[in-house]
Amino acid sequence: MSVSLTPGAAERVKQYLEQTPGGIGLSVSVRKSGCSGWTYALDIAKEARPDEQVFHSHGVDVRVPEAALEQLEGTEIDFVSQGLNQQFQFKNPRVTGQCGCGESFTTAEAPP
Protein backbone atom coordinates (compact mmCIF):
# COMPACT_ATOMS: atom_id res chain seq x y z
CA MET A 1 0.00 0.00 0.00
CA SER A 2 1.01 3.61 -0.18
CA VAL A 3 0.22 7.13 0.93
CA SER A 4 -1.13 9.25 -1.92
CA LEU A 5 -2.39 12.70 -2.82
CA THR A 6 -5.43 13.71 -4.82
CA PRO A 7 -4.68 15.95 -7.81
CA GLY A 8 -5.91 18.98 -5.81
CA ALA A 9 -3.65 18.18 -2.86
CA ALA A 10 -0.69 17.64 -5.19
CA GLU A 11 -1.22 21.05 -6.79
CA ARG A 12 -1.34 22.72 -3.37
CA VAL A 13 1.83 20.93 -2.24
CA LYS A 14 3.58 21.99 -5.47
CA GLN A 15 2.71 25.61 -4.61
CA TYR A 16 4.26 25.16 -1.15
CA LEU A 17 7.35 23.55 -2.70
CA GLU A 18 7.81 26.50 -5.07
CA GLN A 19 7.77 28.81 -2.03
CA THR A 20 10.16 26.68 0.04
CA PRO A 21 13.83 26.81 -0.98
CA GLY A 22 15.30 23.32 -0.82
CA GLY A 23 11.93 21.57 -0.57
CA ILE A 24 12.07 18.01 -1.95
CA GLY A 25 8.59 16.73 -1.13
CA LEU A 26 5.83 16.44 1.43
CA SER A 27 6.68 14.83 4.76
CA VAL A 28 3.66 13.01 6.23
CA SER A 29 3.83 11.54 9.70
CA VAL A 30 1.85 11.04 12.90
CA ARG A 31 2.54 12.00 16.46
CA LYS A 32 0.91 11.06 19.74
CA SER A 33 -1.73 13.61 20.62
CA GLY A 34 -5.25 14.16 21.86
CA CYS A 35 -7.61 11.75 23.54
CA SER A 36 -7.65 9.20 20.71
CA GLY A 37 -3.91 8.71 20.35
CA TRP A 38 -2.59 10.08 17.02
CA THR A 39 -2.67 13.25 14.95
CA TYR A 40 -1.35 13.92 11.46
CA ALA A 41 1.82 15.96 10.94
CA LEU A 42 2.58 17.58 7.56
CA ASP A 43 5.69 19.51 6.60
CA ILE A 44 7.79 20.29 3.57
CA ALA A 45 10.73 17.87 3.53
CA LYS A 46 14.11 19.48 2.90
CA GLU A 47 16.30 16.39 3.09
CA ALA A 48 16.03 12.68 2.39
CA ARG A 49 16.15 10.40 5.41
CA PRO A 50 17.25 6.77 5.43
CA ASP A 51 14.29 5.63 7.57
CA GLU A 52 11.51 6.78 5.23
CA GLN A 53 9.45 5.38 2.39
CA VAL A 54 8.93 7.62 -0.65
CA PHE A 55 5.71 7.41 -2.64
CA HIS A 56 5.27 9.32 -5.90
CA SER A 57 1.83 10.87 -6.33
CA HIS A 58 0.81 13.28 -9.11
CA GLY A 59 4.35 14.61 -9.46
CA VAL A 60 5.04 14.99 -5.72
CA ASP A 61 7.28 12.86 -3.51
CA VAL A 62 5.35 11.90 -0.38
CA ARG A 63 7.88 10.97 2.31
CA VAL A 64 6.69 8.82 5.24
CA PRO A 65 8.85 7.65 8.14
CA GLU A 66 8.78 3.85 8.43
CA ALA A 67 7.61 4.21 12.05
CA ALA A 68 4.39 5.93 10.83
CA LEU A 69 3.51 3.46 8.06
CA GLU A 70 1.37 1.30 10.36
CA GLN A 71 -0.98 4.24 11.00
CA LEU A 72 -0.83 5.72 7.47
CA GLU A 73 -0.94 2.79 5.03
CA GLY A 74 -3.55 3.42 2.34
CA THR A 75 -4.17 7.04 3.31
CA GLU A 76 -5.22 9.50 0.61
CA ILE A 77 -4.67 13.18 1.32
CA ASP A 78 -7.01 15.72 -0.25
CA PHE A 79 -7.04 19.52 -0.20
CA VAL A 80 -10.47 21.09 0.10
CA SER A 81 -11.76 24.65 0.00
CA GLN A 82 -15.10 25.48 1.59
CA GLY A 83 -15.80 29.19 1.56
CA LEU A 84 -12.84 30.87 3.22
CA ASN A 85 -11.67 27.62 4.83
CA GLN A 86 -8.94 25.58 3.17
CA GLN A 87 -7.41 22.45 4.63
CA PHE A 88 -5.87 19.09 3.97
CA GLN A 89 -8.19 16.18 4.70
CA PHE A 90 -7.14 12.58 5.30
CA LYS A 91 -9.01 9.53 4.04
CA ASN A 92 -7.36 6.85 6.13
CA PRO A 93 -8.80 3.32 5.89
CA ARG A 94 -6.99 2.34 9.10
CA VAL A 95 -8.89 4.81 11.31
CA THR A 96 -11.22 3.03 13.73
CA GLY A 97 -12.19 6.03 15.87
CA GLN A 98 -11.76 9.76 16.35
CA CYS A 99 -12.08 12.12 19.26
CA GLY A 100 -15.15 14.35 19.37
CA CYS A 101 -13.36 17.40 17.94
CA GLY A 102 -11.66 15.39 15.15
CA GLU A 103 -8.18 16.38 16.33
CA SER A 104 -6.90 12.85 16.93
CA PHE A 105 -7.61 9.29 15.81
CA THR A 106 -7.01 5.62 16.58
CA THR A 107 -6.12 2.92 14.06
CA ALA A 108 -6.69 -0.79 13.64
CA GLU A 109 -3.94 -3.21 14.53
CA ALA A 110 -1.51 -3.95 11.71
CA PRO A 111 -2.54 -6.91 9.57
CA PRO A 112 -0.50 -10.10 10.15
Image (cartoon, grey):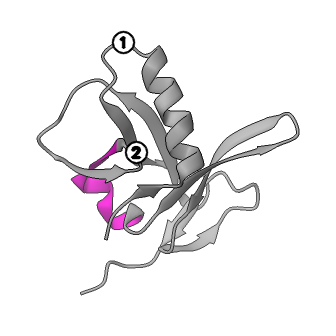
Measured Cα–Cα span from mark 2 to mark 1: 19 Å
Q: Which residues are magenta?
A: 61-71
User: Please, what secondary structure does the residue beneath circle 2 have?
Assistant: strand
* Residue pictured at 54% horizontal, 50% vertical: 7
Give the numbered dot on residue 34. none
Nearest the eye: 54 or 66: 54
Q: Earlier in the sequence, mark 2 or mark 1?
A: 1
* Residue pictured at 59% horizontal, 47% vertical: 8
Give the numbered dot on residue 21. 1
Residue at the far bottom in the pictured view: 112
Is 27 located above or below residue 55 in the figure? above
| 48 relative position to 9: left or right | left
Tell me the quadrant of the picture where the C terminus can be found.
bottom left
Residue 74 belongs to magenta span: no
* Residue pictured at 47% horizontal, 74% vertical: 94
Q: Position of residue 13 (x, y in %)?
A: 49, 35
* Residue pictured at 15% horizontal, 46% vertical: 51
Whether residue 33 is visible, yes or no, is no
Nearest the eye: 13 or 58: 58
Whether residue 41 is visible, yes or no, is yes
Q: Position of residue 28 (x, y in %)?
A: 40, 45
Give the numbered dot on residue 28. 2
Q: Position of residue 36 (x, y in %)?
A: 58, 62
The answer to which image quadrant residue 24 occupies is: top left
Which kind of residue does numbered mark 1 sit on? Pro
| 29 relative position to 92: left or right | left
Which kind of residue does numbered mark 2 sit on? Val
Q: Residues within 10 Å of mark 1 (few under 14, many from 20)?
A: few
Nearest the eye: 8 or 67: 8
Is 19 located above or below residue 71 in the figure? above
Nearest the eye: 8 or 3: 8
User: Please, what secondary structure does the residue beneath circle 1 have?
Assistant: loop
